[in-house]
Image: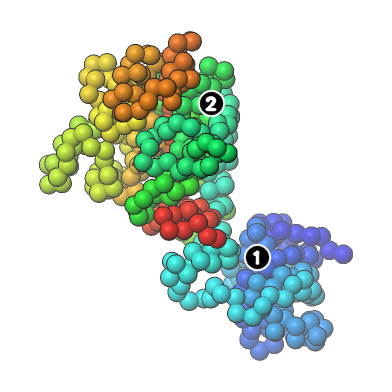
Amino acid sequence: MPKPAYISEILSGRYSNEEVFIRGWLHNKRSSGGIHFLIVRDGTGVIQCTMKKDKVDSSVFEEAKKLTLESTLELMGVVREDKRAPGGYEVHVSDLRVINRAKDGFPIAKKYHGPDFLLDNRHLWIRSQKMQRILRIRAEFLKAAREWLDENGFTEFHAPTLITAACEGGATLFSVRYFDKTAYLTQSWQLYAEAAIASLGKIYTIAPSFRAEKSKTRRHLTEFWHLEVEVPWCDLEGIMKIEEELLFHVIRRLCEKPSTIRDLEALGRSPSDLLKAEPPFPRITYDEAVEILNRDGIKFEWGNDLGWIEEKHLTLKFDKPFFVTHYPRRAKAFYHKPDPNRPEVTLSADLLAPEGYGEITGGGQRIDDENELLERIKENNLNPNDYEWYIDLRRWGSVPHAGFGLGVERTIMWICKLSHIRDAIAFPRLLNRVYP
Ligand code: ATP
Ligand code: MG
């Protein structure tokens, strides 16, 4: 019995001229005369397997001829280097066993399908090369982010998903029946993170956040993955440094692994564009952003949050991510710390990705004083009773602290050069979609 081998190992040249045994799905197939070209996928890669009529039993050759797409197979054969084969290697098949013969007419055909059809068939579409590449890059992204955070002394911490009080404003809360009470799905770990820094110091989480986003945009999901960081004894400048170093570490990792480089390039993203994101990232203030917009003829009122149109315009002026700092207090959630030198703005920063992508992180310094917090809670028409435990944190060992939240799909969207956020996640949750 030959060695079981993964396709990625074969494509790396490890089994040249050896006999191997591979298992996978029939991704594609064509025949010409006495040869079948079986394109097989196993989750690690895709390889061409050629079956010549005179090299296998005639029953095997006949079975391969009738084989349906997405059937599962076990194949045996010898690995040969071949410049003409995609990936540079192919398997010369000596035997084939069909494990599960797929039904005829796999719904995803080699033709144009509209986005709704692909979303309805998402459970099958995630097998496509495009989705495989994105999902692999996403996994590499999170692995590299964890690596940097762990190496720099951050502890992973988990906050609850079922909560009772809003942190990003009530309009986008999903409510759930919690026995005889109402609870909500979390929008961010924010309030709990501020409790946990007094226990663990520097912390991070990678977890889903939920927001009932009622408008259709290309960059909002109702369930997204949130990479959040919170740091005691840290100010606005300190947290921006952490963000840029973390992001650049991840980009460097993605751009040094040959298989990830191949995935990026196949998606139309050149690694050299990403590698421009070397720290320090440019910083402009919100005021400067408004000035640029007004100068360029885009009507925008000071005090509002920057929307997609404004962000898009600003991002076209940069070729790497950049920070917009000091947002007005009315544009930011209640826990953002007002600037002591200019209380109408906050010590906040959003990180915007270039090329029209816009906001990928939001963060800044948090309020550490009890009275200031109470003032901001009232100003936002929130009920202090709902936040009693959170206010408590300012009574028992308060420290200056800062943090940020990075939208994983927003960042993957930019890294993979996607035109819609739905493709940055396997099963997107959108205004009109929770199935499959
Ligand atoms: P936006 O103004 O784009 O709605 P936000 O200001 O509401 O974003 P934050 O509350 O600062 O966003 O959340 C932190 C990060 O989480 C954002 O920078 C973004 O990357 C991501 N994010 C926020 N809402 C969504 C969403 N609905 N879908 C996907 N990612 C999101
Ligand atoms: Mg929002």
Q: Among all residues in the image, which is located at the extreme right?
A: 1
Q: Can you say whether 66 is above or below 122 in the image?
A: below
Decide if residue 154 is on the left or right side of residue 237.
right
Which residue is labeled 1 in the image? 41
Q: Is mark 1 within 8 Å of ligand 1?
A: no
| Residue 159 locus on image (x, y percent) | 55, 31
Q: Identify the residue shown where x is 75% and y is 59%.
A: 5
Q: Amino acid at mark 1?
A: Arg
166 and 284: which is toward the camera: 166
Image side of residue 356 versus residue 406, left or right: left
For the question of whether residue 313 can be seen, the reply is: yes
At x 71%, y 58%, the residue is 6
Snapshot quadrant of residue 121: bottom right
On the question of residue 283 being in view, the answer is no
Where residue 432 sits: x, y (%)? 43, 58
Which quadrant of the figure has residue 83?
Answer: bottom right
The amino acid type, in three-letter code, at marker 2 is Ile
Q: Which residue is at a point 26% across and 31% down the rendered structure image?
A: 330
Q: Position of residue 269 (x, y in %)?
A: 43, 54
Read off the residue under disc 2. 203
Q: Residues within 10 Å of mark 1 (few under 14, many from 20)?
A: many
Does 340 sit above or below residue 242?
A: above
